[in-house]
Image: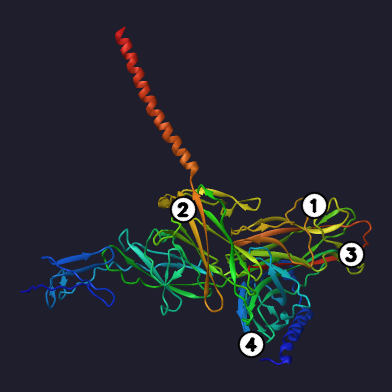
């Protein structure tokens, strides 16, 4: 366990480092002219540490500009913005004392061009900690841009999202499926879009993963499963008290609606992807028609074991345009045959009439 | 002279798990016993020794298993160093019969632990045999749910009819990378010049924000400002940032997304209220507001943003009206 002094040293050193970074007279006019470009990795981190322990993780930064840039680290917190896993970044308040548990080494530095830099983030979790904490670690250049008169200076920042689970005794691990739906009841062609709305009714973040199984048999008897679609392969988390919607598509079919591309760029209309039908004749065995069932099986860890959650939805795939064309063709074909027979019959009649005359 | 006697060698007539209770061999040299699940094969051969000719070699009565050709190593790809939780694999079917099926064994630790690619692409504990076409043919398929920054080895075996499965192919190796985000912004300053009262002033240059990420859940770009508008320290006055039409407002400051593009992936989309036109701008403040988003990995994503300002004749005159805008890129949690 760290002493009180040790616990306070971090924030003090961080503050010192930040102020040092801000007060260094480091001007990089070339960088100002070129702009700023930073690569950071990873994009999010899950940490687990018990109260009274210390946990570390490494964050990687690279300055992609051809000149050195002084960098600094700022801390924010975040919660869920909506249901897509997007963070709602929050400016820290005095109540966010958990931000003081984090230290960075180095806390400020000069990023040399195209040279990877590793920052060690250490979180000293106090014994009073409980449940989970969300850190938004902003790695950004120290702004040195100058204005000549009125205007704006512009800075860029890469944020790494860090979630800390303190594994405290009062944790409740529980999630439920708020809804599992297909975007339509009837599709003419695949893909079929599924929306999986997960609600975290516990008090610590969780990352459920699983599959959507597709079958024509509602009992999902052995051997009847046509396809399985992984859900949340990225390990996205659901924050406590919030919902997160995972979207997956069943697209193993023929023909298939695919995003329209022009010159390699996906076409959008009103911020929505535009689709076009793709006929891949090597996939004709995947022609889909009839009623299908989708069974969702996901699991999350309750700390001791994996807990499954399930849901089911049914939908129809009827390629009605294709069937209509086929019907039209059949009707036209039958009509043609009838017409031929009719004409033949009339011709015979005429021939007989001519012969009689 | 080679003497023959009835010598039965059943390839796998019994094991600790299975026993073939009823098995016979006809008066020929070889025979096959099959069920829907298993097949066994035997032959008549010499009891000992090896018979040779210039063309053939007959071993001492054992049945050399009729194994398939060993497949070529699969091709593994990490998408030029962009895949962090998946790898693309493409099988080679050139060595095998047309309807042969294949399974793919994968390991992150030199096959101390072996996983098998499942039909869905996830890794599981049991082998899944599928045809070359079902594994994606020449386009291949992705094995998914992998750990980042990890080297994976993969090998393939083939099966066909009554043939014994082939030997494992040579091993192919590829590494997942780490999920990353590259965010660029330029220029780092925009001068607005004189803020003539009653006129909407646009910065001579637009801000370009560029974004590349391999994270499959996409990324977001947020904007926040230090003062929530153009602030004059000398006059202690702020022309507040607004959402609205500056042409119709007496004063204000805001941002307007001009365009978005990407090389691949994405798409990068502009978010309200920054998607206006003419003099319709979106507000900024110390709070983080989302200006761009992409729901998927994107390469070469780029958005341009215009700055517009309007002062009123009642505003105190000053030459130091300024704002520090910070554009932040993050992925999802």
Q: Residues within 10 Å of mark 4 (few under 14, many from 20)?
A: some
The residue at 50%/75% (across/down) is B150
The residue at 44%/65% (across/down) is B89
Q: Is residue B148 visible?
A: yes
Return the residue at label 3. Answer: B319
In space, the residues marked 2 and 3 are separated at their CA atoms by 63 Å
Q: Quadrant of the C terminus of chain B?
A: bottom right
Residues at discs 4 and 1 in contact (Cβ within 8 Å): no
Return the residue at label 1. Answer: B279
**Which label sits on residue A53?**
4
Depth check, mark 1 against mark 2: the one in front is: 2
In space, the residues marked 3 and 4 are separated at their CA atoms by 53 Å
Picture coordinates of residue B298, whole percent (x, y): 60, 62
Q: Residues within 10 Å of mark 3 (few under 14, many from 20)?
A: some
Q: Which sits in the foreground, B189 or B118?
A: B118
Depth check, mark 2 against mark 3: the one in front is: 2
The relative height of residue B265 versus residue B4 in the rendered view (above or below) is above
**Looking at the picture, do discs 1 and 3 lie on one chain?**
yes
Residues at discs 2 and 3 in contact (Cβ within 8 Å): no
Picture coordinates of residue B107, whole percent (x, y): 43, 75
In space, the residues marked 1 and 2 are separated at their CA atoms by 46 Å
The residue at 65%/63% (across/down) is A83
Q: Which sits in the foreground, B226 or B299?
A: B226
SS of the residue under disc 4: loop
Picture coordinates of residue A134, whole percent (x, y): 67, 75
Return the residue at label 2. Answer: A253
**Looking at the picture, do discs 4 and 1 lie on one chain?**
no
Q: Which sits in the foreground, B222 or B206?
A: B222
């Amino acid at each position: 366990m760290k002493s009180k002094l040790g616990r306070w040293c971090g924030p003090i050193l961080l503050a010192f480092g930040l102020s040092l970074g801000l007060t260094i007279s480091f001007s990089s006019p070339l960088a100002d002219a070129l702009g700023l470009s930073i690569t950071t990795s990873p994009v999010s981190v899950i940490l687990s540490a018990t109260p009274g322990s210390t946990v570390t993780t490494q964050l990687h930064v690279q300055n992609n500009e051809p000149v050195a840039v002084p960098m600094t680290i700022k801390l924010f917190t975040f919660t869920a913005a909506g249901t897509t896993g997007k963070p709602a970044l929050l400016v820290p308040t005095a109540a966010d004392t958990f931000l003081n548990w984090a230290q960075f080494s180095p806390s400020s530095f000069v990023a040399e061009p195209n040279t990877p830099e590793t920052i060690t983030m250490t979180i000293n979790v106090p014994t009073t900690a409980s449940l989970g904490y969300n850190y938004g670690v902003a790695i950004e250049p120290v702004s040195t841009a100058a204005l000549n008169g009125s205007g704006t200076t512009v800075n860029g920042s890469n944020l790494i999202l860090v979630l800390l689970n303190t594994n405290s005794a009062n944790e409740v691990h529980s999630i439920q499926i708020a809804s599992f739906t297909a975007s339509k009841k009837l599709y003419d062609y695949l893909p079929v879009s599924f929306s999986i709305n997960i609600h975290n009714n516990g008090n610590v973040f969780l990352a459920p993963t699983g599959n959507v199984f597709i079958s024509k048999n509602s009992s999902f008897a052995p051997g009847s499963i046509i396809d399985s679609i992984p859900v949340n392969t990225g390990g996205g988390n659901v924050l406590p008290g919030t919902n997160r919607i995972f979207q997956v598509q069943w697209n193993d079919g023929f023909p298939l609606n695919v995003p329209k591309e022009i010159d390699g760029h996906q076409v959008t209309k009103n911020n929505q992807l535009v689709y076009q039908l793709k006929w891949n004749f090597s996939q004709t065995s995947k022609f889909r028609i009839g009623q299908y069932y989708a069974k969702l099986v996901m699991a999350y860890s309750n700390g001791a074991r994996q807990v499954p959650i399930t849901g089911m939805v049914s939908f129809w795939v009827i390629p009605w345009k294709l069937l209509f064309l086929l019907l039209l063709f059949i009707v036209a074909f039958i009509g043609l045959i009838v017409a031929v027979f009719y004409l033949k019959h009339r011709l015979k009649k005429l021939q007989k009439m001519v012969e009689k005359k | 002279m080679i003497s023959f006697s009835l010598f039965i060698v059943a390839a796998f007539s019994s094991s600790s798990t299975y026993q073939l209770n009823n098995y016979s061999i006809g008066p020929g040299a070889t025979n096959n016993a099959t069920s829907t699940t298993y097949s066994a094969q035997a032959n008549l051969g010499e009891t000992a020794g090896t018979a040779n000719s210039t063309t053939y070699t007959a071993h001492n009565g054992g049945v050399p298993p009729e194994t398939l050709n060993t497949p070529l190593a699969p091709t593994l790809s990490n998408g030029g160093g962009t895949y962090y939780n998946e790898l693309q694999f493409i099988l080679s079917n050139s060595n095998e019969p047309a309807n042969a099926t294949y399974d793919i064994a994968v390991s992150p630790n030199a096959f101390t632990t072996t996983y098998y690619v499942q039909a869905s692409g996830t890794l599981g504990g049991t082998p899944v045999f599928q045809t070359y076409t079902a594994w994606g043919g020449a386009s291949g398929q992705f094995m998914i749910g992998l750990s980042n920054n990890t080297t994976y080895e993969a090998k393939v075996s083939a099966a066909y009819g009554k043939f014994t499965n082939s030997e494992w192919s040579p091993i192919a190796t590829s590494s997942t990378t780490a999920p990353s985000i590259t965010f660029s912004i330029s220029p780092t300053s925009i001068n607005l010049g004189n803020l003539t009262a009653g006129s909407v002033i646009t910065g001579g240059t637009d801000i370009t924000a560029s974004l590349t990420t391999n994270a499959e859940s996409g990324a977001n770009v947020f904007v926040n400002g230090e003062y929530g508008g153009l602030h004059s320290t000398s006059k202690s006055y702020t022309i507040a940032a607004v959402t609205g039409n500056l042409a119709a407002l007496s004063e204000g400051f805001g941002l307007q997304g001009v365009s978005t593009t990407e090389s691949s992936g994405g798409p990068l989309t502009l978010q309200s209220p920054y998607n206006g036109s003419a003099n319709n701008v979106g507000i900024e403040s110390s709070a983080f507001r989302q200006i761009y988003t992409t729901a998927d990995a994107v390469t070469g994503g780029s958005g341009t943003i215009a700055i517009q300002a309007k002062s009123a004749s009642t505003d105190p005159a000053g030459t130091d009206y300024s704002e520090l805008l910070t554009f932040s890129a993050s992925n999802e949690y």
